[in-house]
Image: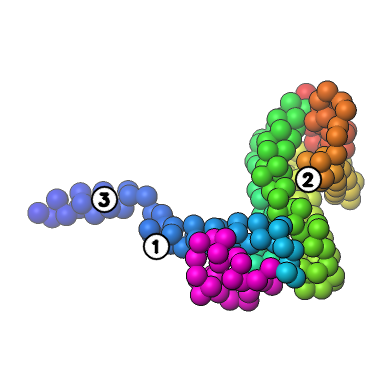
């Protein structure tokens, strides 16, 4: 019996840990559905014209459910929308930094994946851009959040000093920042802004520019 108990305990210990419960998964799904609805409503009615009732109807939930997830109402929803955008871009830079060796082909492939991610975020980016300061708690807070996000991206790119051999910390940080800004501005104008690009392969040119800036960290 003791042996059977030991085997059972061993089997339990080998089971996947940390998986969210069905209740937690449902809560996450509802949270994201409300957030998706907020993006849609803000896009249709603008921030000032949208109401919590509008968002609840679009999400197919009650007003109480919206407040259960976002007690601060529209202001908290906007914070969550902004966090979603920055969080997704954070994941993209983490994905690049997890690749052991950077080459031009690696950067080019990463940019292709980034475009797909950016396209998915475009409705949200357009809502935030068109609403401007009307959805920001304050211009100072928005600016601080913007700088903090870029600091995370730069830190991620510079996180492996061995990758940047022969390049001073100050130089690598400026190179990383310029690569981040060049990528962000181009994708914002091209993907989110709908600017017509005439070149056959716009990402190839962007890869050239980014690789030029990241040159000390590239191999091959």
- How many other residues sit within 10 Å of disc 2, few (<14), some (14-19) or many (≥20)? many
* Relative depth, front residue between 161 and 203: 203
Give the quadrant of the C terminus: top right
Position in image of residue 178 (x %, y %): 88, 45
- Residue 210, magenta (yes or no): no
Q: Mark 1 points at which residue?
A: 23
Q: Distance between the residues labelled 1 and 2?
A: 35 Å
Residue 84 appearing in the image: no
Residue at position x 69%, y 72% from top?
75
Q: Earlier in the sequence, mark 3 or mark 1?
A: 3
Residue drawn 66% across the image and 61% down it: 41
Residue indicated by mark 3: 10
Q: Is mark 1 on a helix, strand or loop?
A: helix
- Residue 2 visible at all: yes
- In this picture, which residue range is highlighted in magenta? 50-76
Residue bearing mark 2 = 192
For mark 3, does the 10 Å Cα neighbourhood hold few (<14), some (14 to 19), or many (20 or more) residues? few
> In the rendered structure, which disc, 1 or 2, sits on the residue that comes first in sequence?
1
Q: Name the chief secondary structure element in magenta.
A: helix
């Amino acid at each position: 019996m003791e042996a059977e108990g030991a085997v059972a305990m061993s089997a339990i210990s080998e089971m996947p840990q940390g998986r969210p419960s069905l209740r937690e998964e449902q809560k996450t799904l509802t949270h994201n559905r409300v957030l998706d609805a907020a993006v849609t409503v803000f896009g249709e009615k603008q921030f000032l014209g949208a109401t919590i009732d509008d968002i609840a109807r679009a999400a197919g939930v009650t007003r109480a459910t919206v407040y259960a997830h976002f007690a601060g109402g529209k202001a908290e929803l906007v914070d969550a929308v902004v966090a979603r955008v920055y969080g997704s871009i954070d994941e993209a830079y983490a994905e690049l930094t997890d690749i052991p060796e950077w080459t031009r082909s690696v950067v080019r492939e990463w940019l292709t994946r980034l475009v797909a991610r950016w396209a998915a975020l475009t409705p949200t980016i357009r809502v935030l851009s068109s609403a401007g300061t009307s959805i920001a708690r304050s211009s100072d807070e928005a600016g601080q959040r913007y700088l903090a996000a870029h600091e995370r991206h730069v830190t991620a790119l510079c996180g492996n000093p061995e990758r940047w051999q022969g390049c001073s910390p100050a130089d690598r940080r400026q190179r990383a920042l310029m690569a981040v800004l060049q990528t962000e501005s181009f994708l914002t104008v091209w993907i989110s802004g709908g600017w017509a690009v005439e070149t056959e392969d716009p990402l190839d040119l962007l890869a050239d520019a980014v690789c030029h800036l990241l040159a000390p960290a590239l191999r091959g």
